[in-house]
């Protein structure tokens, strides 16, 4: 994405992933040469954390690549790449011949923030209602966000955004 000052603001997921992979490789070598049980335990814990972050970033990179490819295909469909890109920037996704995609997130009414783990992206119009039910049910389950903060279903609202 390019902001109104012309700066590129998207995260470079592939560079982040490559950096994490090199850190994982270095840390894996260090685990074998640990001088104590505690150092080995700490290195293994850090290694597990880095692998988890790498998995999350790999999923985000795949989603970003799919979105980029979807937009590129729609711009190519217009016939003129420059004209298609300008139409997208000025008028948004509605200007291009493509099916809209939606994002559903659960918002806490009091604080107005997104409940962690409740964002669903790349949904079709038919999947919106099911995703709304799913994120609310996930929050209300035992051990979920609502139970943790002593809240009910009325304390939340879903926000649907087209992109």
Image (tube, helix red, strand yellow):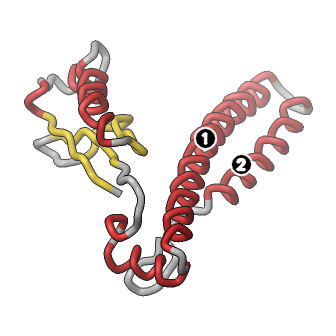
- Labelled disc at residue 44: none
User: Residue placed at 38% from the left, 83% from the top?
Assistant: 4
Considering only vertical position in the picture, is 12 above or below 149? Answer: below
Q: Where is residue 104 in the image (x, y as percent from the top left)?
A: 30, 42
Q: Position of residue 66 (x, y in %)?
A: 56, 51
Which residue in the structure is indicated by mark 2?
A: 20
User: Residue placed at 36% from the left, 40% from the top?
Assistant: 119
Spatial CA distance of label 2 from label 1 is: 8 Å
Considering only vertical position in the picture, is 134 above or below 159? Answer: above
User: Residue placed at 15% from the left, 38% from the top?
Assistant: 157
**Crowd tier of the residue under label 2, counting other residues whose Cα lies within 10 Å: few below 14, some 14–19, many 20 or above:** some
Tell me whether circle 2 and circle 1 mark residues in contact (CB < 8 Å): yes
Q: Is mark 1 on a helix, strand or loop?
A: helix
**Crowd tier of the residue under label 1, counting other residues whose Cα lies within 10 Å: few below 14, some 14–19, many 20 or above:** some
Looking at marks 2 and 1 on the same chain, the residue that comes earlier in the sequence is marked by 2
User: Residue placed at 15% from the left, 23% from the top?
Assistant: 150
Which residue in the structure is indicated by mark 1?
A: 53
Q: Would you say 29 lies left or right of 122 here? A: right
């Amino acid at each position: 994405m390019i902001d109104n000052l012309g700066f590129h603001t998207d995260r470079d997921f592939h560079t982040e992933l490559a950096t994490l992979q090199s850190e994982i490789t270095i840390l894996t070598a260090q685990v074998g040469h640990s001088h104590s049980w505690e150092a080995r335990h700490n290195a293994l814990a850090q290694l597990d954390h880095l692998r988890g972050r790498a998995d999350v970033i790999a999923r985000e990179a795949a989603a970003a690549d799919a979105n980029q490819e979807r937009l590129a295909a729609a711009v190519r469909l217009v016939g003129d790449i420059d004209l298609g890109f300008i139409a997208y920037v000025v008028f948004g996704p509605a200007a291009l011949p493509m099916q809209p995609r939606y994002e559903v997130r659960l918002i806490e009414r009091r604080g107005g923030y997104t409940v962690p783990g409740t964002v669903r992206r790349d949904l079709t119009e038919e999947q919106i209602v099911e995703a709304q039910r799913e994120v609310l049910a996930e929050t209300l389950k035992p051990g979920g966000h609502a139970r943790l903060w002593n809240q009910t279903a009325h304390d939340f609202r879903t926000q649907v955004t087209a992109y």
